[in-house]
Amino acid sequence: MPGFRGWPEDFQRFFIGLELDNSKRYFEANRRTYDESVRAPMVALMESLEDEYGPAKVFRANRDIRFSKDKSPYKTNIAAHNGKDGVGGYLSLDKKGLTVAVGCYELSSPQLTKYRKKVAADAGGVPLASIVARLEKAGYKMGGEQLKRVPAGWPQDHPRARLLRHKLLYVYRDFGLQPWLGSAAARARVVKVFADAEPLSAWLRKFVL
């Protein structure tokens, strides 16, 4: 596998076409574009990050349609994940460009209980609120499934009610389409997100995982 050099421009055309014709016929007719301009660059990028950021996985193109009303066979993006100790980075590329996220995308019931206890207590919650505030000020958005109300056991007007409503926690940056996507410079953008979000990753490793 050659080193990461960015995504050729035809990655976007591939995804636009796939949205218009999400069929095996289209995918097979354009498989070479997918393999060379979509998947190969993502694999090369993720492999280049493994030594520092942990094992990587590039997700398959096929959707799991067993329990879905939507029987479209293919995802209209390519996604990948890497990480260790339960915290990692997530990348998604589609016709609109690149999104990079960092955090926890799944918490077990015991981990969620631990998370809420740490958020509610000042010793853990105040530092987390500060970390999130700094990241949001820097242009990141916070994601994660949220409840409509603070869970039972904590006051609805808790100063960190917003964080208590989360069932998982990550931050992300949607870069959209950028000229640097077609060059090796895209790797530096991904690494910067990982570096910026390291305080959040460290908090999760210390208090939750």
Image (cartoon, rainbow, N blue to C red):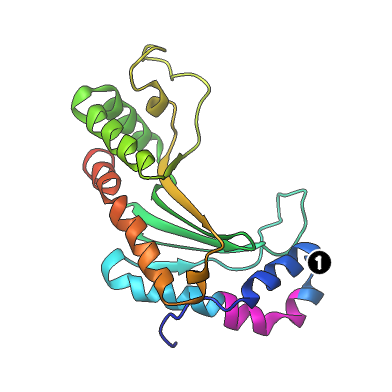
Which residue is painted at 63% across and 68% down in the image? Answer: 61
201 relative to 175, above or below: above
Q: Is residue 116 visible?
A: yes
Name the amino acid type tagged 1.
Asp
Q: Quadrant of the C terminus?
A: top left
The answer to which quarter of the image holds residue 139 is top left
Q: Residue furthest bottom?
A: 2
Residue 187: x and y, percent?
Answer: 39, 70
Q: Main secondary structure of the magenta part?
A: helix
81 relative to 198, above or below: below
User: Residue 63 colored magenta?
Assistant: no
Q: Which residue is mark 1?
A: 21
Which residue is painted at 36% across and 39% down in the image? Answer: 137
Residue 95: x and y, percent?
Answer: 64, 63
Question: Would residue 208 appear left or right of 1 to someone viewing this image?
Answer: left
Q: Is residue 85 visible?
A: no
27 relative to 172, above or below: below
How many residues crowd around disc 1 within 10 Å: few (fewer than 14), some, or many (20 or more)?
few
User: Residue 36 colored magenta?
Assistant: yes
Residue 205: x and y, percent?
Answer: 25, 46
Q: Secondary structure at mark 1?
A: loop
- Name the one closer to the observer, 98 or 73: 98
Q: Quadrant of the N terminus?
A: bottom left
Which residue is painted at 72% across and 80% down in the image? Answer: 30
What span is colored magenta in the figure? 27-38
Q: Residue furthest front?
A: 179
Label tally? 1
The answer to which quarter of the image holds residue 4 is bottom left
Residue 115: x and y, percent?
Answer: 32, 33
Question: Would residue 148 appear left or right of 122 to someone viewing this image?
Answer: right
- Name the one closer to the observer, 31 or 196: 196
